[in-house]
Image (cartoon, rainbow, N blue to C red):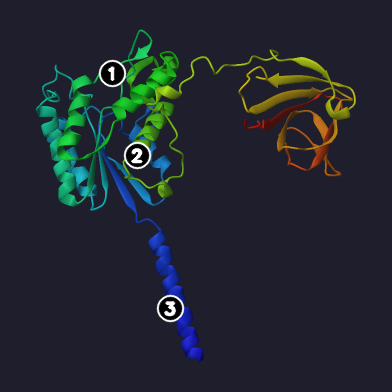
Amino acid sequence: MLARAALRIVLAAFASAASAQQRIAPPLRIVIAGDSTASEYDAARWPRRGWGQELPGWFDASVEVRNRAQSGRSSRSFIEQGWLYDVARDLRRGDLLLIQFGHNDEKRDDPARYNEPQQAFPLWLRQYLELARRTGATPVLLTPVARRHFVSGRATDLHGPYAEAVRALSRRERVALVDLGMTSLRWLDGLGEDASRAFYLHVPEQNLRDNTHFHQRGAAAVACLVVQGLRAQGLVDAARLRRDTDCGIPDDTDTVRPGASRIARDGEYRRAQPSPHGGGGSTIAYPLFADVADLDIVLRRRVLPPGAGIGLHRHTHDEIYYVLSGRGRYVLDGVTHDVGPGDALLTRTGSSHALFQTGEADLVILINYRVIREKN
């Protein structure tokens, strides 16, 4: 009886381990073939980074990124100079091969790199697809990431027929496509002409004014767009991610409300008010954006000078206070707590609280809660 019981325990343990093993996603390798916009740079080139260099930061330990992108290469010179051998050595069945070229294929004045877009460019790209298929890897075509170029204040595509050639090849060969050219162009447009400089290599102290290569913050933003595209294609599971991919500007202009968003400058909402809920003294309130009728978020800054306070009251909604500066005493459900800068105070529905200033400095807090609107 004991032996059978022990056997059942062992079998149950193996079954549990097997079940856990099935829940763990098998390791995934991502190999990158591309140009300088994706490639690696050492510390001496900081803040220059390629998007492929930033890509590993999005994944957990179940994903390995091997970045074989090489600066200055076109789809043709990458192969003719032998860099494709490194890619071939890396690839295994089930891997993803990300393929992004175009920037250097466009260079008509350099016969070692130039490829006309209709025939030669897709012909070279097909060799990467064939390599992936032979090894059982999944090829993923990427349209070339956008250069920073604005016309009349709008981000404008400079890759034209090369991006279209990648899209057409994806359709013909039934290969997954991450349209990085389009998503990065919308990203640039969303940033605007002036702000976008900070994401490319515009570094005055290094005398850099480069609209092709990325500052680290730009490389990170583009890497996010790549991962977002891989997720949209079902090629990377969310369980492997350790960062969000909510980045860029989606293609849904029907949700845009021009002029609805704005900035409130310090002092714009300043109001002297008696202390609320029967508190002592008087306060200065900043009911931020209280004039926006359909806003369901309340955010107030309140200054409690010496002697001022917020009187005891019971809550009909959840509310958070955040202490910016100064010190005070917070009475929550009959218990007193000393509070200071960085403390966050949560009062749930049904609880009661009071707050009063202590010491010589003003107590400054942020108050936040949601407005509950009655449905018609």
Residue ID at (36%, 7%):
152
Residue 135: give x, y in percent of width and height. 18, 51
Residue 191: give x, y in percent of width and height. 43, 19
Residue 226: give x, y in percent of width and height. 34, 35
| One can see residue 51 in this view | yes
- In the foreground, 232 or 255: 255
Q: CA distance from mark 3 to mark 2?
A: 40 Å
Q: Quadrant of the C terminus?
A: top right
SS class, disc 1: loop
The answer to which image quadrant residue 175 occupies is top left
- In the foreground, 348 or 100: 348
174 up-or-down from 28: above or below: above
Question: What type is the residue that disc 3 sits on?
Answer: Leu
In this rendering, position of residue 67 left or right of residue 10:
left
- In the foreground, 181 or 80: 181
Question: What type is the residue that disc 1 sits on?
Answer: Asp
Residue ID at (17%, 41%):
129
In the rendered image, which residue does mark 3 sit on? 11
Residue 268: give x, y in percent of width and height. 69, 12
125 up-or-down from 333: above or below: above
Question: Few, some or many C-alpha atoms within 10 Å of disc 1 (few <14, some 14-19, many ≥20)?
Answer: some
Question: Few, some or many C-alpha atoms within 10 Å of disc 2 (few <14, some 14-19, many ≥20)?
Answer: few
In the rendered image, which residue does mark 2 sit on? 232
In the rendered image, which residue does mark 1 sit on? 157
